Image (cartoon, helix red, strand yellow):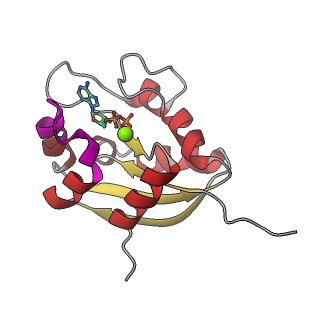
Amino acid sequence: MTQTAPEATLVLVKPDGVRRNLIGEVIGRIERKGYIVTDLKMLTPSRELLTAHYEEHVDKPFFAPLLEFMMSGPVVAIRVEGNRVIEGFRSLAGETNPTIARPGTIRGDLGRDWGSAAVENVVHGSDSTLSAERELGLWFPAE
Ligand code: DAT
Ligand code: MG
């Protein structure tokens, strides 16, 4: 039987999550679900990296506050593997807006919408195979 490589996704613990000491909480939920952490690092991302990462949002009104928020402190970038992990982590994360994200999800339990500036929704997760490959290449470039 041939074995296919497991799917991989990019998870970010955003600056709000790092400031609030929620790195372990996020990784714990990933691991308890059965997904595997295969690479991890902490960094304060540059404007260039974030512009590439959020390329589909460059023309949106929330782009500038989003970048300010994402550059406001260190983030933890995590490569996570597992069967259907892209979809599975998005399910663990919950809806983008913490106000309507369901309780039980990371954003529903922990995210904050202060009504101004950027929503503090704790995590990022890639939304498709294509974006996962692209984003993993940006955050974990081959040495
Ligand atoms: P997601 O992070 O759930 O994939 P997205 O890719 O649409 O959501 O947007 C990226 C980030 O931008 C999101 O985590 C928070 C912010 N954002 C998205 N839509 C927004 C909006 N309408 N107002 C303010 N911030 C928004
Ligand atoms: Mg997205």
Q: Is residue 128 above or below residue 65?
A: below
Residue in view at x 36 percent, y 29 percent: 111
| Residue 80 occupies quadrant | bottom right
Where's residue 62, x and y in %? 17, 31
Residue 10 showing in the rendered view: no
Residue in view at x 39 percent, y 44 percent: 124
Where's residue 135, x and y in %? 38, 57
- Judge whether residue 65 is colored magenta: yes
Residue 87 showing in the rendered view: yes
Where's residue 47, x and y in %? 14, 56
Quadrant, the C terminus = bottom left
Q: Is residue 45 left or right of residue 86?
A: left
Q: Quadrant of ligand 2?
A: top left
Q: Is residue 143 left or right of residue 52?
A: right
- What is the span of residues highlighted in magenta in the rendered image? 53-66
Q: Judge by depth and name the residue closer to the eye, 126 or 34.
A: 126
Where's residue 112, x and y in %? 30, 26
